[in-house]
Amino acid sequence: MASEKLWAGRTRGRPERAADDFNSSISIDCRMFRQDIAGSAAHAAMLARQGIISQDEYEKIKSGLEGILTDLEAGRLEIDQEAEDIHMFVEAELTRRIGETGKKLHTARSRNDQVALDLRMYLRDEADGIISLIKQLMGAILRQAEANLDVIMPGYTHLQRAQPIVFAHHMLAYAAMLERDIDRICDAVKRMNLSPLGSCALAGTTHDADRELTAELLGFSGITKNSIDGVSDRDFCLELMSALSILMMHLSRLAEELILWSSWEFGFVELDDGYTTGSSIMPQKKNPDMAELVRGKTGRVYGNLVSLLTTMKGLPLAYNKDMQEDKKEVFESVDTVRACLSIMEPMIATMKVNRERMHAAAQEGFINATDLADYLTKRGLPFRSAYRTVGEIVAYAMKNQKVLETLTLEEYKSFCDLFEADLYSEIDLSNCVAKRVSAGGTGPDSVAAQLKWLREYLGK
Ligand code: ARG
């Protein structure tokens, strides 16, 4: 049997040991101790301002809470794993330190609004941290793009060589995705950053509490509208988790390309030794484990989102203990995302780009075939006919083991008499890239504009 609980009165207050362990969330929610203490201090300040507790009582609570925080930070106080959760722990420790006055802290408050408050505060800080990590990764992408402005590579569709692009353009595609990820996280934070404190158990309180005041003290932009919703809502977790899932999908695609590009077959990039491993048996191997783990961990982040959605879907209003399961999932997602961003940034920054291999790959595979069709179109042939003619030329070249650059003008003319000697400059790879002048395309002006945007976005 465990020791007597705070709620002893209505019941014996002594659940079975196994039930106590089953019920406990302290091992998970202890990481919110700073938020719990800050929330409690703001709540106490409000209680004093409203005359619900005296100024003297407030001072005691405040310095008690400050002492707990300092001791926890300094490692002088350990969080008691026997406590049910972090909220119970802080309150019990406060009462142990300052006596009866500590028991006044929970006036006009419930753990239901307290946990919702702590979690919102915790996650908005994590969101900030994640945004800075995304920006660091964008910084590494920027540097690689700047260093590889003129590196021509094959662009792919269906993983088949499609059209020539520059490597910088390919990397900048990821910067565009990451900008949207940041936007999505900021948008989630907008709704997260409302204070539920004062919703109490579900119905509000009979005390003259000032919810706006605590919201302001804690840096929220406002308060939640409805107390029942205030304690039942976990949309703020789900929105963040879905933004993080999309972010992980992007990181996973980038990781997948690194894995592919660093394979023997591609050889487009070489990952730094610091971000690869060897094989325990095959001495020639250099494995892109970190990239593979980023790809692999994406599944966890998706899983956590689906898990919490499932937990929430059948719950009647208002708070239900099922919701205690939220933290494990959202914390794991946040931790995983942080770890993945932290490893992707140096991995991208240190990766070596093999411009010769990329260029050589771009020269095989007829990736300038569209340009050849465009050549005929600009000389009056309808695009569909030009497309057909070039298709026949490609088939002919393949049969004769040639590429578009090595076919003679006579051979070209045998397919269509619109061909002249200037066709060769049209299908030259650098020209193919330079001619892609449309906004957002792979042409130099467009890539320069994208780089300018990224530098400004990152304040570089
Ligand atoms: N540990 C709980 C949680 O994380 C705190 C809220 C408990 N409220 C309650 N009425 N039992 O959800």
Image (cartoon, helix red, strand yellow):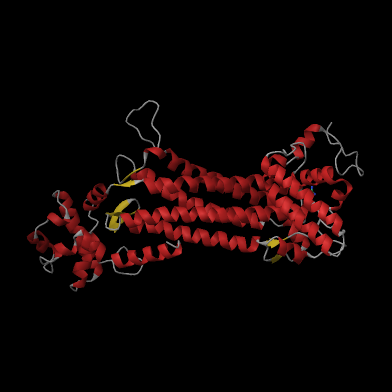
Q: Nearer the viewer, residue 368 or 45?
A: 45
Which residue is depicted at the point 71% across and 38% down? 76
Residue visible at 79% across and 36% down? 20
Q: Where's the C terminus, which quadrant?
A: bottom left
Relative to 414, is 81 above or below? above
Give the residue at the far right of this rendering.
9
Q: Position of residue 174 (x, y in %)?
A: 42, 56
Whole-percent x and y of residue 387? 23, 64
Question: Dividing the picture into quarters, in which one does residue 300 lie?
Answer: top right
Between residues 226 and 61, which one lies in front from this camera angle?
61
Identify the residue shown where x is 25% and y is 69%.
Answer: 383
Percent of width and height locating residue 108: 84, 58
Residue farthest left in this picture: 410
102 lies left or right of 331: right
Residue lying at the far bottom in this picture: please name it. Answer: 380
The answer to whether one can see residue 203 in this image is no
Q: How many marks?
A: 0
Residue, x 44% and y 49% (percent of image)? 345
Any part of residue 292 in sight = yes
Residue 11 rendering spot, x and y as whole percentages: 90, 41
Q: Quadrant of the N terminus?
A: top right
410 lies left or right of 198: left
